[in-house]
Amino acid sequence: MANHASTKKAVRKVKTVTEVNRNRKSRIKTYIKKVLVAAQNNSSEEAKNVLIKAQSEIMKGVAKGIIKKNTGARKVSRLAKLIKQAAA
């Protein structure tokens, strides 16, 4: 266990930051699932709207350092490709 005041504070900070990051990551996954469901239902307008929101959430995650830049770009690209195939 931490003995210094500064390390005790650091432990508290890590705990809160971890919780925030977990929530952000969960939010990203939820939006990705919404896009997948919309693509399966063949509702192209809804799917496009959900894709825009998902893309925004993914890029927020990239900006905050939750996921890497290339990972975010890959996820957005694959979702867009899925929506395009569903619309066709």
Image (cartoon, helix red, strand yellow):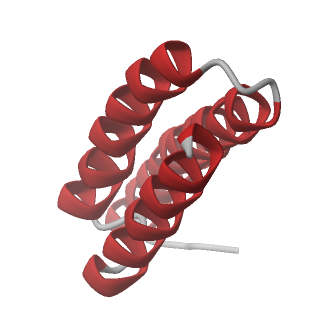
Q: Nearer the viewer, residue 14 or 39?
A: 39
87 vs 17: above or below: above
Compared across the picture, whether 4 is left or right of 15 comes to left
Residue found at x 34% / y 44%: 55
For image coordinates 32% across by 72% down, the residue present is: 73
Where on the picture, by quarter, is residue 33? top right
Residue at screen point 43% across, 54% down: 80
Q: Which corner quadrant holds the N terminus?
A: bottom right
Instruction: Residue 7 in the image: state x and y as whole percent.
Output: 42, 69
Q: Is residue 71 above or below residue 9?
A: below
Image coordinates for residue 8, horizontal then vertical, percent: 48, 59
Q: Is residue 78 visible?
A: yes
Q: From the top left corner, tell me how far across and down residue 68 is, in percent.
A: 35, 80
Q: What is the count of numbered marks? A: 0
> Looking at the image, which is closer to me, 18 or 39?
39
In this picture, residue 20 sits left or right of residue 63:
right
Horizontal arrangement in the rendering, residue 40 relative to residue 31 (left or right): right
Q: Quadrant of residue 6?
A: bottom left
Which residue appears at 54% of the width and 24% of the height? 44
Residue 15, percent across and down?
57, 51
Extreme-bottom residue of the structure: 70
Which one is in front, 50 or 81? 81
* Side of 50 where 52 appears, left or right: left
